[in-house]
Image: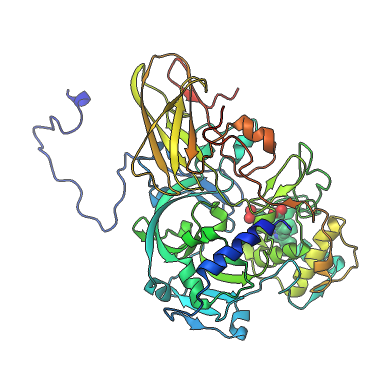
């Protein structure tokens, strides 16, 4: 929904600039689908691109203790790394606490980010099952999934994040005046 | 004897003047010149930012070594011969490009500012930045060289359904942003040059996305992949970060344009005027909506505004240097600048911004910055 105005603008650019599609310079090597798959995952909000594998919070707790707790605290309260838990209901207050649980709109993003960027000091080392498990655990700590709920490529995108409808399009310019207008 | 007259005027009669140091392969600045990027101390300095010393800069180009930094997982060490850019997703021909392939394509050099979406984030709070560097210094300006993005996309053949592209960096966190395929991208580059040399590692060596006028984070550094899609991916750095939380609890997303902004860099916080008399007030202005058309300066906290002179030519989506000669009468004064751009947008006050967006937005602060000059010549941000 928030992308509606952007979508209209896209069509214009696509027609005008990308209309002529024949390659002109012929540079680069054309890749097969198989080769591009080896280049890493791309995960959409609908779950497209999520790999096989699964995990529950129970399994994820062990992963968390071994690979995340040192920076994010024993229950996700934060430390060297940001806090991962809490803040639901605070976004409209004077002291908003933005976390995975209170702020992030999609569970797929949690999976994608943890899988690609965490653990901070050894990014890219999590196995798919470990990532599903530790995501389940972080969501469980936030009261979003049950302890034994299985997270995989089909269940994770269906998890409804508390702030799913909390994002709005850019309305700017929204402040100040326009030149020529009276002060 | 003679010390106050400046070096070399008298010399030392007995020793004469021996020659200076010999030629060198790569130049260093004078040892007397000290400005440096400032950074906050953290336990994870790989995920942080360092700011350009704006008040020590002349003109509009930021030396590459002083360009601000913002990294989410440190600066990767990339051999350009090994680096590849993959363009895939909704394209006719998924393409893998080497740096050599990219450098064969028609290129262009353009001067543009780059500003972190979080620049001046502290200004939303009660304690504002004490000087230009620590309040407005996550902004810099360089000459960038690269290939127009659209030429490269055309090589891959973007499918009609594609409306976004996911840009991914080769840093440790493989940072990603969803980029809408809108008209502004006509100006976008895949940049490999900065101020006459290859990009600095901190700015994305060997290849970065450059989308002039947009927030820095979306201009993904160490670019390794462009993945064309129908929808954005709502990556962590466009949802949890670089999004603007409003007082009603809603978060604005994809707030890409950096709105018109300016700051007086002399006199500015931390400096001291040597006494009454003539000075040149100067500073920088920029806008993500095109060119700066006007910068006004006030010396009485906003009652009266005088038009500053803009260095010519005023460049598109680039720093614009403004200047105004000023005779200080030695009394307390409040100096500030206000920029207007060609869209007609006028830089708002801090109070106007807070009135609409509250204090928790964190990003995209572009308010007027007021410096207080005391009778003793010292300059502060005026915070109690």
Residue B50 seen in this snapshot: yes
On screen, A111 above or below A181? below
User: Which of B360/A144 is in front?
Assistant: B360
In the drawing, does residue A28 fall left or right of residue B19? right
Residue B2 vs residue B173: left or right?
A: left
Q: In the image, what residue occupies the spot 60% across and 77% down?
A: A39
Which residue is more in the foreground, B86 or B164?
A: B164
Quadrant containing the N terminus of chain A is: bottom right
Residue at horizontal 45%, vertical 15%?
A: B375
Total marks drawn? 0
Location of residue B372 in the rendering, given as x and y in whole percent from the top left corner = 50, 22
- The quadrant of the picture occupied by the C terminus of chain A is top right
**Along the line of sight, which residue is nearer the eye, B168 or B309?**
B309
Residue situated in front as seen by the camera: A102 or B35? A102
State the colouring used for the structure image. Answer: rainbow
What x and y, as percent, mark residue B230?
A: 66, 69
Place of residue B248 in the rendered image (x, y in percent of width and height, measured from the top left): 77, 41
Left or right: where B61 falls relative to B70: left
Examine the rendering and report whether any part of residue B172 can be seen.
Answer: no
Can you give x and y, in whole percent of width and height, for residue A168 in the image? 72, 51
Quarter assignment of residue B364: top right
In terms of image quadrants, where is residue B173? bottom right
């Amino acid at each position: 929904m928030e992308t509606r105005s952007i979508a209209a603008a896209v069509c214009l650019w696509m027609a005008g600039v990308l209309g002529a599609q024949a390659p002109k310079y012929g540079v680069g090597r054309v890749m097969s689908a198989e080769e591009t798959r080896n280049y890493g995952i791309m995960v959409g909000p609908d779950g497209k691109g999520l790999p096989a594998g699964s995990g529950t919070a129970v399994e994820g707790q062990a992963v968390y203790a071994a690979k995340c707790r040192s920076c994010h605290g024993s229950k996700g309260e934060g430390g060297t790394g940001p806090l991962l838990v809490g803040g639901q209901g605070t976004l409209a207050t004077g002291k908003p606490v933005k976390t995975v649980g209170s702020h992030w709109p999609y569970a797929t993003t949690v999976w994608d980010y943890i899988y690609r960027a965490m653990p901070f000091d050894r990014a890219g080392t999590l196995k798919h099952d470990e990532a599903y498990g530790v995501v389940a655990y972080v969501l469980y700590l936030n009261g979003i999934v049950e302890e034994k709920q299985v997270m995989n490529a089909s269940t994770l995108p269906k998890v409804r994040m508390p702030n799913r409808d909390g994002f709005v399009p850019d309305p700017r310019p929204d402040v100040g005046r326009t030149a020529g207008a009276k002060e | 004897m003679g010390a106050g007259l400046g070096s070399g005027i008298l010399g030392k009669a007995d020793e004469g003047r021996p020659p200076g140091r010999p030629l060198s392969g790569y130049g260093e600045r004078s040892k007397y010149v000290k400005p440096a990027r400032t950074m906050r101390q953290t336990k994870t300095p790989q995920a942080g930012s360092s700011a350009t010393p704006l008040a020590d800069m002349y003109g509009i180009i930021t030396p590459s070594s002083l360009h601000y930094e913002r990294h989410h997982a440190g600066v990767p060490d990339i051999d350009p011969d090994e680096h590849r850019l993959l363009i895939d997703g909704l394209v006719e021909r998924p393409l893998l490009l080497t740096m050599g392939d990219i450098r064969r394509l028609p290129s262009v050099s353009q001067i543009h500012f780059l500003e972190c979406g979080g620049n001046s984030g502290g200004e939303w709070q009660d304690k504002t930045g004490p000087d230009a560097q620590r309040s407005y210094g996550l902004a810099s300006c360089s000459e960038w060289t690269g290939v127009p993005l659209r030429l490269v996309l055309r090589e891959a053949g973007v499918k009609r359904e594609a409306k976004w592209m996911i840009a991914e960096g080769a840093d440790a966190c493989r940072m990603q942003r969803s980029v809408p395929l809108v008209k502004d991208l006509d100006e976008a580059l895949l940049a490999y040059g900065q101020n006459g040399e290859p990009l600095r590692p901190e700015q994305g060596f060997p290849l970065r996305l450059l989308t002039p006028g947009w927030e820095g984070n979306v201009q993904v550094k160490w670019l390794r992949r462009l993945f064309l899609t129908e929808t954005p991916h709502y990556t962590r750095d466009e949802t949890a970060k670089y999004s603007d939380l409003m007082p009603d609890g809603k978060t604005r997303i994809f707030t890409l344009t950096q709105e018109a902004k300016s700051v007086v860099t002399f006199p500015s916080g931390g400096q001291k005027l040597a006494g009454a008399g003539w000075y040149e007030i100067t500073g920088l202005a920029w806008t993500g909506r095109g060119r700066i058309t006007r910068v006004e300066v006030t010396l009485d906290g906003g009652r009266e505004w005088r038009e500053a002179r803009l260095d010519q030519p005023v460049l598109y989506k680039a720093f614009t240097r403004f200047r105004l000669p000023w005779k200080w009468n030695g009394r307390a004064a409040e100096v500030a600048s206000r920029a207007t751009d060609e869209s007609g947008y006028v830089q708002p006050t801090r109070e106007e911004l807070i009135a609409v967006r509250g204090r928790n937005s964190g990003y995209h602060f572009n308010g007027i910055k007021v410096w207080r000059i005391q009778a003793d010549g010292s300059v502060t941000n005026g915070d109690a």
